[in-house]
Amino acid sequence: MSPTPESRLPLVDPATVTDPTVRAVYDEIERELGFGIVPNVFRAMGEQPAVLRAAWDLFRATVLQGLLPRTVKEMIGIVVSAANDSQYALTVHLHSLGVQGISDDVLAQLAAGADGAPGLAPSVAAIIAVAHTAARRGPLAVSDADIAHLEAEGVSRSEWAEVIATIDLFRYINGFTDLARVPIDAI
Amino acid sequence: MSMQAGSAADRPPDTSAHTISRTIVAEIATALAATTSLTELVTALRQHLKWLLPVTHVALYLLEDDGPNRRYRAVGAGDDETSHPIDDGLIGWALRHDTALDLPDLQDETRRPSGVTLVNTEQREGSLLILPLRAHGALLGALTIGSTRTDAYSAVDHSLVNLVALQVAAAAHTALLIERERRARALAEEAVRMRDQFLSTISHDLKNPLTTIKGRAQLLRHTLEGIEGPVGERAAAELTRIDHTASRMTRLINELLDVARLRAGQPLALDLHPGDLIELTRRIAAEYTDMGKRHRILVETAAATITGEFDLFRLERVLDNLISNAIKYSPTGGDITLRLREERAEGDDAPGTAILEVEDYGLGVPAADLPHIFERFHRAGNVGGAAGTGLGLAGARQIVEQHGGTITVDSREGSGTTVTVRLPLYTGEGR
């Protein structure tokens, strides 16, 4: 783990923000995310209200809504962030899953890139495997056979679309947090 | 709930994966609790269970009744809903014994209860879990979870599906209650619809002959107008009386449908048109004057017209009701005065209020009954044998209030009653 560097973007304080768009987005985040705080990644976007609005809407539509369980989507987040060696999302979502009761050894297995954890439902294991391939070897490495495997395990087309969106969302978050050196939240 | 027949799969229980599954069970519980019908429940189960277990089919079966020949059938999203006797099939076996069944290989007859005839819709190969569902102490039905693989379910899976089955039982119980309530409401709405249709048909059928009576009476009166002398005059007066009585009868029939709605406290759909309250009042008063000689119906007003937007047919029935009450409760006869005036608000352009008072000098209303006089079915203690359902004033008040007006009663027992109706005179705007 690399040492926590100085943020390259100012972290807007939710308590004093005046821009109405930013204010509204921060209110939604505090209400809907379940952490009771505005994570630093969204504070770092606070000086670009339109980007913040779009990024939060994307996060909300991808992770908080949809067909896949949030747990599975956070697991994808861990797999992708571990592959990118991106500490911000990795730490935040490890923490989130830990709070939900998932044991440290499973989290370590996921973070270490172990190919799924034994005992996962076959549909979830197949999704995690695809996320691994896409994150470690690139999206082009995901083969038709991988997709056929997902289908055989009962993952529907719309659920597959959500898997793609989730993998890409975390690639985006990883890129943003690494470039901006967003400090990990004190959680 | 214990598992019978067959052993746990070879897949080793993995406690760490178990913790992931528990968070997913919690998400499934949230999704199930949000469902309000059995179809939604089965759909949600099919959507979510695959994140927990290897699963190719999920079905929900409910017991149909409590009799000795109980049957069960699949419910919800698109399954064959044919019912089966509880003596048939593996599901019947699990329900009869109120025991969960773990069938790791359906093709292997030695690994399932002996002597069970399979129902034609039942899964034939792979693994099947059958979990009885109980809610509030009663057996509700069963949840089946199947996979095309043999030995698909581990010991961990068994404990997870038991957790899920508890959630499904609670959600199914709620969905059944909601569906029962929906059905009862639909039946009640259908009954109201049928009643309205029946009354509307009856009203129509009763009005047809009345129209003929009115028409013939008017025709005969015109014919008699040529005949001079007391016989002709007498006959013409009697025919006018027949004409007016037929009008009143038509009004009462029109009221049938409204009465049914008013009894149920349902609103009426007012049919508003410009009209003159004075003209209306004079016409009704004239009809009553023709009908009885013991009471004099007087109309007092300084205005020539009081015009506004009214449902004249309904207001006609309000007036009819107030006048007939005044007559009914003045058994010894006497005057009944209808007073009309218009009250203007500040500024000449502002719409005013029409005020109609119906005053009699009859029995009056006892003070104890005054506060209840507009309640449905309430009748004052001193009305004795006077006929009536006690519905009229409640209906009159509803009609007046739907016009945006008010109706009040002032009365002293033994000296008479004054009913005051106030109606806003809208100009067509601001409604």
Image (cartoon, grey):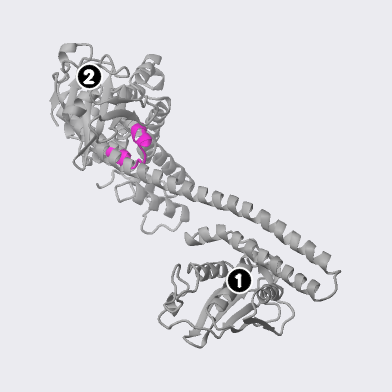
Label 2: few (<14), some or many (≥20) within 10 Å?
Answer: many
Three-letter residue code for mark 1: Asp
Q: Which residue is under mark 2?
A: B152
Q: Which residues are magenta?
A: B29-43
Instruction: Name the residue nearer the viewer: B60 or B290.
Output: B290
Location of the N terminus of chain A (image quadrant):
top left
Q: Main secondary structure of the magenta part?
A: helix
List x then y, in percent, for residue B251: 63, 63
Relative to B389, B295 lies left or right: right
Chain containing the residue with disc 2? B
Q: Which residue is mark 1?
A: B320
Query: Taking the image as drawn, is residue B186 in sight?
Result: yes
Circle 1 or circle 2, nearest the eye: 1
Q: Residue furthest bottom?
A: B415
Q: How many numbered marks appear?
A: 2
The residue lying at 25 percent from left, 37 percent from top is: B169
Q: Are marks 1 and 2 in contact (CB under 8 Å)?
A: no
Quarter of the figure with residue A91: top left
The reply to whether the magenta stretch includes residue B329 is no
- Is residue B33 in the magenta section? yes
Q: Earlier in the sequence, mark 1 or mark 2?
A: 2
Which chain is disc 1 placed on? B
Q: Mark 1 vs mark 2: tell me if same chain.
A: yes
Amino acid carrying label 2: it is: Ala
Q: Secondary structure at mark 1?
A: helix
